[in-house]
């Protein structure tokens, strides 16, 4: 399986349009230690020809331009593109908005859990994806599904959706009390396995690491995991927001209850942080925090990064 990181930043991207925190300033100034990043998404492929997007980021137009694996075949029909399927892991803006980019008469298969499919079905704007070309298929929880393109051809990959602790999307929060924000079905992790039995986990949003997640990670070759914040109060301390990471449904990278600690027994699996917020110092290659991450056996995803399983 080939895996290309299309985008590695959290919602808002890096630098974020309305932010001049120190990381955003350095990225905007072209500092070579601080690479700009688009909003999180992966492309995966079993044959290197037909690609499956994991989440459709608002930055998809730029990602399509920057990644030649997703360019049309000049020897193919007048209109064509290698995207054969798209799988969505949550209802947040940074997971679904790129679907609106895929509206120009291209056939593909769209997979999402019931919760997200209901959001898409209820929002008329997503009907720009022509129903004759885009088949919508609900991903059942904890049950592997063989991936197909729009015409029913197998793509050589299976996906299993599993629930992870998370929060309902920001735009649904209004009027709900805090206890109703935590949701069992709104966020999923994706486990993608090829015909050789090699597995990738994609968990770009997660409130805490459960025993099930650890067990799945142990059996995977590689895990891309929520790297939103270095520490829980980061946005508050920077004067940028009133919200903790916990309030946003995101575990922190550091600390006793953080991700590095939670995965510390996991030696064999390659571990990569993705969905990284612009305030997280691990985005600066020369920071203490980035060094700690590397010393703990983790990588920090960057746009254009490619790994092969
Ligand atoms: C998140 O991951 O917390 C969301 O992307 C927030 C948002 O929708 O802006
Ligand atoms: Mn997000
Ligand atoms: Zn910033």
Image (cartoon, helix red, strand yellow):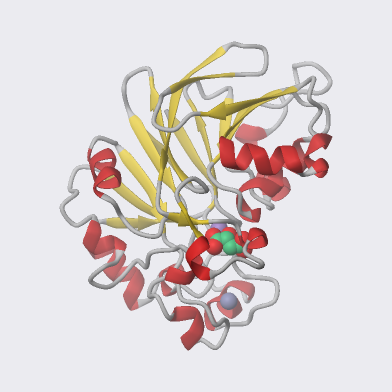
Spot occupied by residue 288 in the image (x, y as percentages of width and height): 32, 77
Q: Quadrant of ligand 2?
A: bottom right
Instruction: Give coordinates of residue 135: x percent, y percent.
Output: 69, 23
Instruction: From the viewer's side, name the closer residue of 114 and 156.
Output: 114
- Image quarter for residue 25? bottom right
Q: Residue at x 55, y 73 (%)?
A: 31
- Where 231 sits versus 308, above or below? below
Image coords of residue 67 (percent x, y):
62, 41
Is residue 217 shown left or right of residue 15? left
Task: Give the camera-side residue of 275 and 291.
Answer: 275
Q: Residue at x 80, y 16 (%)?
A: 77
Q: Is residue 29 above or below residue 220?
A: below
User: Residue 56 location in percent, x, y?
Assistant: 63, 43
Q: Taking the image as drawn, is residue 64 in sight?
A: no
Picture quarter with the N terminus: top left
Does residue 64 lie above or below 40 as drawn?
above
């Amino acid at each position: 399986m080939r895996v290309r990181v299309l985008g590695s930043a959290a919602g808002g991207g890096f630098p974020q349009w309305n932010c001049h925190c120190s990381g955003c300033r350095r990225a905007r100034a072209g500092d070579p230690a601080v690479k700009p990043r688009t909003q999180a998404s992966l492309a995966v492929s079993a044959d290197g020809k037909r690609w499956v997007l994991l989440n459709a980021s608002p930055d998809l137009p730029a990602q399509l331009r920057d990644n030649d694996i997703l360019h049309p075949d000049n020897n193919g029909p007048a209109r064509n593109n290698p995207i054969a399927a798209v799988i969505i892991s949550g209802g947040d803006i940074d997971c679904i908005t790129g679907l609106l980019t895929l509206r120009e008469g291209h056939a593909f298969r769209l997979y999402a859990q019931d919760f997200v499919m209901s959001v898409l079905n209820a929002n008329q704007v997503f009907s720009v994806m022509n129903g004759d070309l885009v088949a919508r298929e609900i991903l059942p929880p904890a049950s592997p599904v063989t991936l197909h393109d729009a015409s029913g051809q197998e793509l050589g990959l299976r996906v299993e959706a599993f629930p992870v602790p998370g929060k309902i999307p920001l735009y649904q929060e209004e009027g709900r009390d805090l206890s109703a924000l935590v949701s069992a079905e709104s966020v999923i992790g994706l486990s993608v396995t090829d015909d050789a039995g090699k597995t990738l986990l994609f968990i770009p949003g997660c409130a805490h690491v459960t025993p099930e997640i650890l067990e799945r990670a142990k059996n995977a070759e590689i895990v891309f995991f929520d790297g939103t914040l270095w520490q829980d109060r980061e946005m508050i301390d920077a004067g940028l927001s009133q919200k903790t990471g916990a309030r946003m449904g995101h575990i922190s990278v550091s600390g006793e209850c953080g991700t590095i600690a939670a995965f510390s027994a996991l030696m064999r699996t390659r571990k990569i942080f993705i969905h990284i917020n612009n305030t997280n110092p691990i985005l600066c290659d020369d920071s203490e925090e980035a060094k700690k991450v590397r010393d703990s056996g983790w990588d920090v995803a960057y746009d254009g990064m490619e790994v092969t399983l």
